[in-house]
Image (cartoon, rainbow, N blue to C red):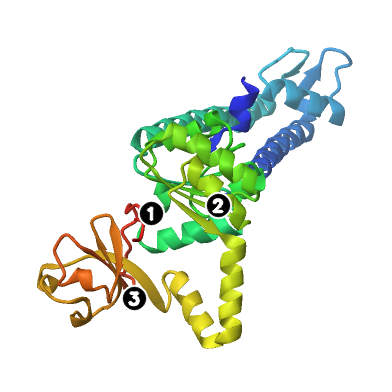
Amino acid sequence: MDERAVTHRVRLPVKVVERPLRQVAKRLLMALLVLVLTALVVYVDREGYRDSADDSVDLLDSFYYATVTLSTTGYGDITPVSDSARLTNIFVITPLRVLFLIILVGTTLEVLTERTREEWRLKRWRSALRDHTVVIGFGTKGRSAVQTVCATGLKKEQVVVVDPSAKVIDAATADGYAGVMGDATRSDVLKRAEVGKARQIIVAPQRDDTAVLVTLTARQLNRSAKIVAAVREEENAPLLRQSGADAVITSASAAGRLLGLSVLSPAAGMVIEDLIQQGSGLDLVERPVVRAEAGKRPREIDDLVVSVVRGHRVLGYDDRSIGTLQLTDRLITIVRASPGTQITPHIRPLPTD
């Protein structure tokens, strides 16, 4: 088997009922109990058996007979000769032999069946996966980003996590996301995550140089996807944009600005933190203009409008060039979070004038 394929194997979320090792150990214990029970049955009725070696059957001979009988080896050196022993073989030992074989052979069949089922699930998953979201790096930033996107209505089945850590991938699949373990700077790893068919890609590794390489590779594989990347240092942001990122978030400077704002006004800092925490309190929502709002000014509608997206421009709510709202416009508003609140996830960030 290809070692690289094992390392970069796709893991789909599953509901684990019991640990595999514990399940195998339990079956082996059951098989051992059947063996012991058979040996005890033979030993209790040892007078009805004959050993060709010494004509007597002791406890060791009983275990030997049980072993060769349950495994269907049957050397014939120990045989039942009395009627009671033969009846016991028919009605007790034979069913125990069948049970023993079911336990051992059934474990092997289940393993083979599980492999086949997993391959079938993986093939069906690949064929059905379209316009999904790929999250590269499932640390604090990546996990928070995917939770925010899912809070807007994206299904977990449409999220694929890529990370080099097996523990991180296990945590992602436990949360309901598909996972690919491997180095995301390699194109074969991203291909396993079906990056070429993705609608949006979130790049959130631990290192800035890794983010640049991942963005370059992802952009080569998918020219139309929206790529949003995170970097620690602001000086690396232009390099990421040149690599193909549509939007770059500088985590260190963003956290610093929020800290500074909180020092100047703790209440304002709380409001900003509430706005960027999707699904609770106040949310920033981008939505289209409805027919009842067309022809009105931004301040005349019920929602609190922050900006108006018109064509390829993002205009402030007080920009005089807006005039009245048009049906082709989109609004960025502040609303009270509710289960029905959703942000359209596929809108590409637009440059401001």
Q: Which image quarter: residue 300?
A: bottom left
Circles 1 and 3 in contact, beta carbons < 8 Å? no
Numbered circles on residues, count: 3
The residue indicated by pointer 2 is 237
**Residue 294 picture location, percent across and down:** 12, 70
Nearer the camera: disc 2 or disc 3: 2
* Secondary-structure class at tag 3: strand
Q: Which residue is mark 3?
A: 334
Calculate the distance from the C-alpha at mark 1 to the C-alpha at mark 3: 23 Å
Which amino acid type is marked by label 1? Lys
| Label 2 secondary element | helix
* Element type where label 1 sits in the image: loop
Quick check: can you spot residue 188? Answer: yes
Q: CA distance from mark 2 to mark 3?
A: 28 Å
Residue depicted at x 79% and y 32%? 43
Number of the label disc, if any, that sits on residue 155: 1
Which residue type carries mark 2? Answer: Ala
Residue 13 seen in the figure = no
Q: Nearer the viewer, residue 15 or 327?
A: 327
